[in-house]
Image (cartoon, rainbow, N blue to C red):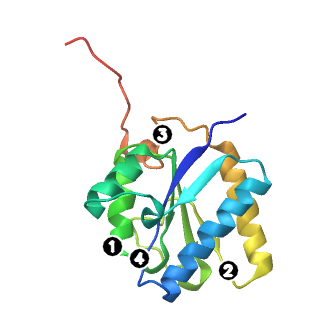
């Protein structure tokens, strides 16, 4: 049996019941169902789905640090999403960027990284998104030293030293 991996979903949240909130929850539901149907042992959650108390920012930091994978929804160029995505990159998390086709105008900081587009209203486009996502997920080897920006920054993990 494979070990269940945690996937932290970075997303704009919005007010409870808002379009943003509903869309985010639908994506999580769809991804968890997709993974279950394809025997991919990953559980996707956003910060309010963890059973934690305390300061939200500290919880988000811990959730990102403890995650095995991060999926970031870049729809609407949300500043909180940008911050959390940068934080995940700092911890060398495998990251998959997604964005709604309705709002597919990525900021210049994100354009150079492959981003999957989704459309929850179009069944054909959604199927294509899911197939692309499955392909990406199957290629991730959960290498703790990899992040999408590793190659461009030249960062290399040198390991422990005896100084």
On screen, residue 95 above or below 122: above
On screen, residue 5 above or below 105: above
Disc marking residue 118: none
On screen, residue 14 above or below 79: below
Helix, strand or loop at label 2? It is loop
Disc marking residue 79: 1
Q: Tell me whether circle 4 and circle 1 mark residues in contact (CB < 8 Å).
A: yes
Please report whichever mark, 3 or 4, sits nearer to the chain's N-terminal start: 4
Query: Residue at the spot x=72%, y=64% of the render?
Result: 130
Please report whichever mark, 3 or 1, sits nearer to the chain's N-terminal start: 1
Would you name the residue on which mark 3 appears?
146
Please report whichever mark, 1 or 2, sits nearer to the chain's N-terminal start: 1
Q: Tell me whether circle 4 and circle 2 mark residues in contact (CB < 8 Å).
A: no
Label 1 environment density (alpha carbons within 10 Å; few <14, some 14–19, many ≥20):
few
Would you name the residue on which mark 4 appears?
77
Please report whichever mark, 4 or 2, sits nearer to the chain's N-terminal start: 4
Disc marking residue 120: 2
Q: Tell me whether circle 1 and circle 2 mark residues in contact (CB < 8 Å).
A: no
| Spot occupied by residue 13 in the image (x, y as percentages of width and height) | 43, 76
Q: Residue furthest bottom?
A: 18
Q: How far is disc 4 from disc 1 in space, using C-alphas?
A: 6 Å
The residue nearer to you, when weighing 84 against 58, is 58
Q: Nearer the viewer, mark 4 or mark 2?
A: 2
Label 3 environment density (alpha carbons within 10 Å; few <14, some 14–19, many ≥20):
many
Q: How far is disc 1 from disc 2 in space, using C-alphas?
A: 23 Å
Label 2 environment density (alpha carbons within 10 Å; few <14, some 14–19, many ≥20):
some
Q: Is residue 29 left or right of residue 75?
A: right
Helix, strand or loop at label 4? It is helix
Q: For the N terminus, which image quadrant?
A: top right
Q: For the C terminus, which image quadrant?
A: top left
Helix, strand or loop at label 1? It is helix
């Amino acid at each position: 049996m494979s070990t269940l991996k945690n996937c932290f979903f970075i997303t704009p949240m919005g007010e409870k019941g808002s379009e943003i909130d509903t869309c985010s929850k639908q994506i999580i539901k769809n991804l968890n169902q997709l993974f279950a149907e394809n025997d991919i042992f990953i559980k996707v959650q956003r910060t309010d789905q963890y059973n934690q108390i305390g300061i939200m920012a500290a919880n988000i930091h811990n959730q990102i640090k403890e995650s095995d994978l991060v999926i970031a929804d870049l729809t609407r160029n949300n500043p909180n999403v940008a911050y959390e995505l940068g934080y995940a990159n700092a911890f060398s998390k495998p990251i998959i960027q997604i964005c709604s086709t309705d709002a597919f105008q990525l900021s210049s900081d994100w354009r150079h990284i492959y981003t999957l587009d989704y459309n929850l209203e179009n069944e054909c486009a959604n199927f294509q998104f899911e197939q692309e996502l499955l392909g990406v997920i199957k290629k991730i080897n959960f290498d703790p030293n990899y992040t999408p920006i590793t190659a461009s920054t030249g960062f290399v993990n040198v390991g422990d030293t005896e100084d």
